[in-house]
Image (tube, rainbow, N blue to C red):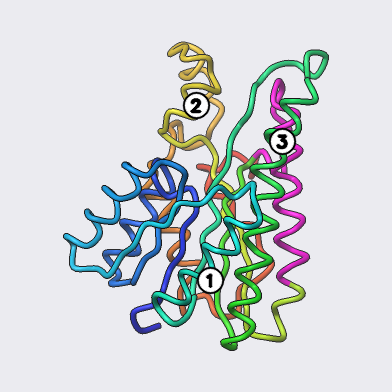
């Protein structure tokens, strides 16, 4: 694909930021999105310093008006939308199900599930109008295995993976591919929060991973770039685990 237009939600830190930089190295034109203005404009400036055409557009994926405007502004700025990476998400509050709250459920599902649904809705409309495109959702190994103490987060990622497959069936005949990447533990602040910022707990968790380490954000980003590329034109409706062998056990 020649200089594709790429939209990334949740682009300001971690996997989203690494993905923006990875696409920039491929020469893409980029729209990066998130809720923090200063960080967003700084990232867009960094991408432009690499020689890329890039813009920051503030949006909160929990609100449909924001998502609709984000996609419309992307198409208005660049004339099309070739690739969308739906990375915005939260792990919510972790803890046993006996302590689960409605507020935590609603906050986690509104971001992870509704946010992904709204993003795909408006991305699909833009891509259908132009005759094709690629959507990559960011899930987690939590989307197909259980993690004690993370029932709400796990449920939200199961939903993301189910929606990915359903929307892929809608898009297949019109040239829109929809896949998801499901990372295992990644060396980010989110991993530290998951283990309660306890280094012994993190070491114990990573010992359960056959690769005996966390992934880097760049390793996840490179998988996203592949899934969105012309090298994967017959790949749709798939959940690609990038987990150091964890789900193979």
Numbered disc 1: secondary structure: helix
Name the residue carrying label 2.
206
Q: Which image quadrant is residue 2 in?
A: bottom left
Do the CB atoms of the residues marked 3 and 2 lie less than 8 Å apart? Answer: no
At x 44% / y 34%, what residue is drawn? 214
- What is the span of residues highlighted in magenta in the rendered image? 142-168
Nearer the observer: mark 1 or 3; the answer is 1
Q: Position of residue 13 (x, y in %)?
A: 39, 41
Nearest to the eye among marks 1 and 2: give it.
1
Q: Which residue is labeled 1 in the image?
A: 72
**Residue 65 within the magenta-colored segment of the rendering:** no
Which residue is rendered at x = 70% and y = 42% of the image? 110
Q: Quadrant of the N terminus?
A: bottom left
Q: Residue sitting at 57 percent across and 54 percent down?
A: 181
**CB atoms of marks 1 and 3 within 8 Å:** no
In this picture, is 225 found above or below 197? below
Q: Main secondary structure of the magenta part?
A: helix
Q: Where in the figure is residue 192, as x and y percent of width and height?
A: 46, 22
Q: CA distance from mark 3 to mark 2?
A: 19 Å
Report which quarter residue 104 is drawn in: top right
Judge whether 87 appears above or below 7 on screen.
above
**For mark 3, what is the residue?**
154
Q: Position of residue 42 (x, y in %)?
A: 26, 47
């Amino acid at each position: 694909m020649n200089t594709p237009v790429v939209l990334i939600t949740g682009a300001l830190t971690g996997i989203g930021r690494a993905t923006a930089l990875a696409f920039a190295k491929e020469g893409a034109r980029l729209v990066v999105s998130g809720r923090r203005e200063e960080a967003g404009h700084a990232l867009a400036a960094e991408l432009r310093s690499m020689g890329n055409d890039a813009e920051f557009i503030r949006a909160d994926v929990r609100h449909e008006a924001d998502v609709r405007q984000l996609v419309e502004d992307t198409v208005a700025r660049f004339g099309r939308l070739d690739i969308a990476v739906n990375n915005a998400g939260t792990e919510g509050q972790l803890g046993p199900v006996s302590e689960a709250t409605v507020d935590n459920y609603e906050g986690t599902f509104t971001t992870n599930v509704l946010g992904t649904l709204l993003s795909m809705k408006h991305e699909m409309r833009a891509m259908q109008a132009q005759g094709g495109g690629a959507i990559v959702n960011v899930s987690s190994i939590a989307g197909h295995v259980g993690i004690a103490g993370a029932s709400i987060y796990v449920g939200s990622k199961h939903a993301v993976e189910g929606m990915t497959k359903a929307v892929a069936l809608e898009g297949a005949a019109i040239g829109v591919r929809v896949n998801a990447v499901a990372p295992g533990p990644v060396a980010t602040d989110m991993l530290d929060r998951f283990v309660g910022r306890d280094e012994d707990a993190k070491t114990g968790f990573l010992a359960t991973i056959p690769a005996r380490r966390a992934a880097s954000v760049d390793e996840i980003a490179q998988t996203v770039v592949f899934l969105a590329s012309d090298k994967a034109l017959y790949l749709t409706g798939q959940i690609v685990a990038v987990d150091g062998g964890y789900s193979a056990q």
